[in-house]
Image (cartoon, helix red, strand yellow):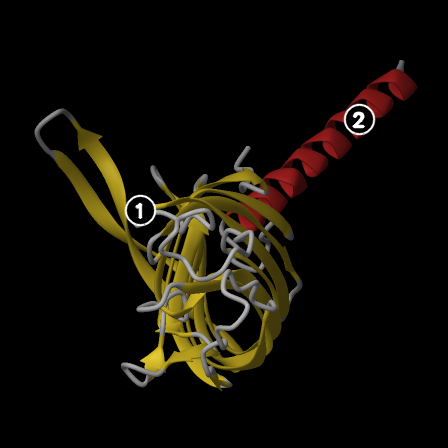
Amino acid sequence: MKKIFYCTLYVLLITTALRATADTTDDNRRNNPYKLRPLKVQLLLLTMDDINFGCGLQVDYHFRHAVIETQWRKAFYWSAGKPDPADEKNATTNSLSSFSNFEIDGEYYFADYLVNKRYKNILSENSTYYTYNTGYGKARRIFAVKAGAFLSSGYVATDSAAHYNTNYTTKGFAFGLARKRIDRIQSTRRHDGVREMYLQVLTGGTSLETMKLKNAQAAAPVTAFKNIGWRLGGQRYGEHMYVGYELGERPGLVNPDKGKASIPFNYFLITFGITIYGNEKWK
């Protein structure tokens, strides 16, 4: 009888200890910004890159003090309309390609430390107002080196006045700095996600597809290229959503009339998407 009693007591003590450990571990996981799920996949439902509208995919893998990001975007609609090679106004007959962009970036965190973040802890709410008190949790503040490579392609007007249209390919590298914050706090509402801003220098070379001239006697226009550019951007993802933006100047063909890189090299990018894998688990 004593053996049964002690065995039962032992099992109860072990079960209680395991449950306490599990609760503590879960609490640490839920409120620890170092415990992000490493692999995240974002489906980019809408990308607006100047006059190009499309979609894409982004895949990130997070290490403790680094991250690898890959992103692919493809345009499917042009608000200004893509030139028709059969149009008699066009001086070329090249079959024109839609804009696409692929890049891979790596970040190394050279400064990574915890800071206090204030958040709202909802006490009660209805359709018109809510009451709350203020709580504090830990968030990661990060400064990183951000570098990578990119490949973009599409069609471009080398001489818009004479309607010389062809395809281009730009290959290059990006390097710069990033500032990031990672939250993972659970109160009555969840506060989790990654917020980032970055500034990078772009360098690369551009090649043009040989122009197929309708008039064999005509000479192709003289083209010039700019090999240095820049971009300022940011992104935020977490809680099932993704938002990104960029503003900058890509390396590429220089418009001789304006002395600046022509579209799509001067660009503004906005991206909206959802996280289809890697959302944080809270239970």
- Residue 253 is situated, as x and y percent measured from the top left of the image, at 45, 77
Mark 2 and mark 1 in contact? Answer it, CB < 8 Å.
no
> Residue 246, percent across and down?
37, 65
Task: Give the residue displayed 46% in from the left and 83% down from the top.
Answer: 222
Residue indicated by mark 1: 79
In the rendered structure, which amino acid carries the disc numbered 2?
A: Val
Any part of residue 109 in sight: no
Residue lying at 71% horizontally and 36% vertically, measured from the top left: 18
Observer-nearest of 34 and 149: 149
Quarter location, residue 211: bottom right
Residue, disc 2: 11
Q: Earlier in the sequence, mark 2 or mark 1?
A: 2
Left or right of 55, for residue 122: left
Image coordinates of residue 170 in percent, x first then y, are: 57, 71
Q: Kindly identify the residue that appears in the image at 21 percent across and 47 percent down.
A: 133
Is residue 194 positioned above or below 56 on the image? below
Q: CA distance from mark 2 to mark 1?
A: 69 Å
Q: Is residue 117 above or below residue 38?
A: below
The quarter of the image holding the C terminus is: top right
| Residue 223 image point, x, y percent | 47, 82
